[in-house]
Image (spheres, rainbow, N blue to C red):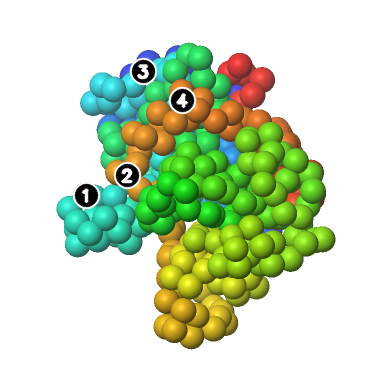
Amino acid sequence: MAIAQQLTSRQPLRKIPASMLAAVYRGVNDVRLETVPVPQIGVGEILIQVHTCGICGTDLKKIATGSHTAPRIFGHETSGAVAAVGDRVTKFSPGDRVMVFHHIPCGECYYCRHKTFAQCETYKKVGCTAGFEPSGGGFAEYVRVLDWIVNRGTVRIPDETSFEQAAFVEPVNTCMKGIERLALEPGETVLTIGQGPIGIMLSSLAKRAGANVITSDLYEPRLTISKAFGLENTINAGRIDPVQEVRRQTDGRGADVAILAVGGNSLIKTAMDAVRPGGRVLLFAQTQHGDAVFDPAAVCVDEKTIIGSYSASVDLQAESVQFVMRQEMALDKLISHRFPLTEAVQALDLAAHPQPDSMKIVIQPGSERQQ
């Protein structure tokens, strides 16, 4: 295979091919495995050979709804090894093991000054691409990391930490942000609705903050995995009404907090009903605009508070990196399925149609090369 010209990069660790495989989004529910050019890097940029990229629910929603123009290459929970570095890059060298945040805010605008980083226009610019409009690019063999992400959003992986574990830094950050917004007090009762990977991370972080955590899910296998992370108080929502059970455990009041960790709007009312008067509800997975119905008197008369949290916080970057790299939680144990890039379409289909025994699903373009 021909070697891609690296006009502004220092000598790469290994020869960079001219083309690579990628899972390319072509339209609504249309992702195809294609051969595309390896992206060229510029001054201040790096090229990463992808090892592991987790599939995020936001990727699936973009694919299913056609909310973004095509073509694109999604995937933003990315870890891998630096394959080449551009001129003026001094922080990294070929061979370094890294993970990357795909969004970093400017730090100076109105929204950044008010700590609402996800609303910053710079934050909304994606700084990683495998070609086409920058969209993360982790569902490909190589990813180009743009300069502002190299400077502020690329993190070295310690030798003792696996690529799989490191790929959880960005989703852990988003969960930490949600927990921070709740301002939990020790001893509060928290109900987490949904025990997929995000629900388990949110529950574990709530417990870490001192809360008494109750988890619920329709699938017993997920509750079994939840228990393996120390979340013993579980409700099988297919057999027991979570609202009634939470009230039973709280002298009839309801939980202090409910976290909705599943997409869609159908369970917003359940979450609202499960919390006591004056309680809080965190909407974590409701990322699509549309009509939702809840009882407005629950907010006004019962003084319940609805809180939203979206994406990551740069203020929590160091804490999330430390949490993951020090392996405070064995996050790689949340991975139920690992797919090579050649089976990316099947991986995305399974993630979009989760089974009782499916948890975190990852695509590993370089698992054989970079162990």
Q: Earlier in the sequence, mark 3 or mark 4?
A: 3
- Quarter where residue 100 is shown: top left
Between circles 3 and 4, the one closer to the viewer is 4
Q: What's under tag 4, amino acid-wise?
A: Met
Between circles 3 and 1, the one closer to the viewer is 1
Q: Distance between the residues labelled 3 and 4?
A: 20 Å
Percent from the top left, x then y, of residue 222?
73, 45
- Quarter where residue 251 is shown: bottom right
Percent from the top left, x then y, of residue 201?
55, 43
Kindly identify the residue that appears in the image at 19 percent across and 62 percent down: 110
Q: Which of marks 2 and 3 is nearer the N terminus?
A: 3
Q: Taking 271 as reference, is 232 left or right?
A: right
Kindly identify the residue that appears in the image at 53 percent across and 34 percent down: 167
Q: Taking 339 as reference, is 118 left or right?
A: left
Q: What's under tag 3, amino acid-wise?
A: Ser
At mark 1, the secondary structure is loop
Between circles 4 and 1, the one closer to the viewer is 4
- In-front residue for pair 323/362: 323
Q: Identify the residue position indicated by label 1 in the image.
A: 107
Q: Identify the residue position indicated by label 4 in the image.
A: 325
Q: What's under tag 2, amino acid-wise?
A: Val
Q: Distance between the residues labelled 3 and 1?
A: 27 Å
At mark 4, the secondary structure is helix
Q: Distance between the residues labelled 4 and 1?
A: 25 Å
Q: In which quarter of the image is the N terminus?
A: top right
Q: Earlier in the sequence, mark 2 or mark 1?
A: 1
Q: Identify the residue position indicated by label 2 in the image.
A: 314
Q: Identify the residue position indicated by label 3 in the image.
A: 93
